[in-house]
Image: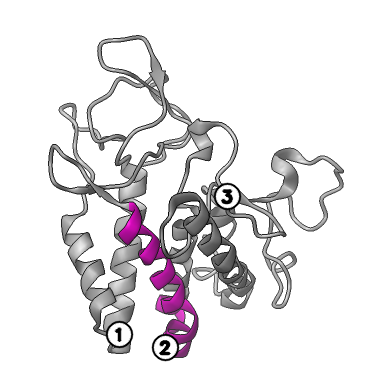
Amino acid sequence: LIGSSRPGGLPSNLQGIWCKDLAPPWNSDYHININLQMNYWLAEVANLSECHLPFMSYVERLVSSGQKTARDLYDCGGFLAGHASDVWHGTVPYGKVQYGQFVVGGAWCAQHFMEHYRFTGDKEFLRQRAYPVFKEASLFFLDWLVEDPKTGKLVSGPSTSPENRFFAPGTETRCNMTMGPSMDQQIIWEVFSNTLESAQLLGIEDEFTRSVQKSLDQLALTKIGSDGRLMEWTEELEEEEPGHRHISH
């Protein structure tokens, strides 16, 4: 990380800056459905805050692209980014449904801004850089979330729990798409919570923060299954591959 994430440059990608391949695995890009975040998990705890900054600068540059994608693709405000991006800052979901219909990539990256603040206590960073990203991520979900007619709770969707599939109840049909997968709900809960925490620290209370609080209070939360497991979806559905390597939730 010290060698591949320097101030003023791009963040560390999947293969690092010395990648020798012309056609590297996963395009040597920025997979923001976990890989890029994993590159930076140790930045703060290892006292490498300055190496964390190129990642957050990159996320800030995703915002304008993500605003256009939110508006043009979903008729929503705010910003979103899909499962992967690159040096051109693309935010449009693409690929197979099982991993491509992913709307929480940018929001998941946003948690790093709060992590940086918690380790540094830099309130100017929180005001000038973190809060604007939280606000744009939250604005998207305020428009994106819908009420589950069964429960009245707010759920994300149509969406997926990345790369895992389930059988449609009573059939052998393999499915990806659902409403309110646990991973989405967890990331949205964190974005809303970080937004409200940072607003409180900055002394901000307005119509926007009240809307976030209202949606957070109504947000569907992760459930525990009859066998004691954290449920991956809103219902107890039979997995195609129990123990799948992506324990997303």
Q: Secondary structure at mark 2?
A: helix
The 10 Å Cα crowd at callout 3, few under 14, some 14 to 19, many 20 or more, is: many
Mark 1 and mark 3 lie on one chain; the one further toward the N terminus is 3
Residue 208 x, y percent position in the rendering: 28, 75
Q: Residue at x 74, y 55 (%)?
A: 16
Task: Give left or right: position of 205 versus 6.
Answer: left
Residue beneath label 2, please?
Answer: 123
Q: Which residue is mark 1?
A: 201
Q: Amino acid at mark 2?
A: Lys
**Residue shown at the point (44%, 27%) measured from the top left:** 244
Specify the segment rendered in magenta: 117-144
Magenta region includes residue 186: no
Residue 121: image quadrant is bottom left
- Nearest the eye: 28 or 181: 181
Say which mark, if any, is on residue 218. none
Which label's residue is closer to the chain start, 2 or 1?
Answer: 2
For the residue pair 14 and 188, the one nearer the viewer reads as 188
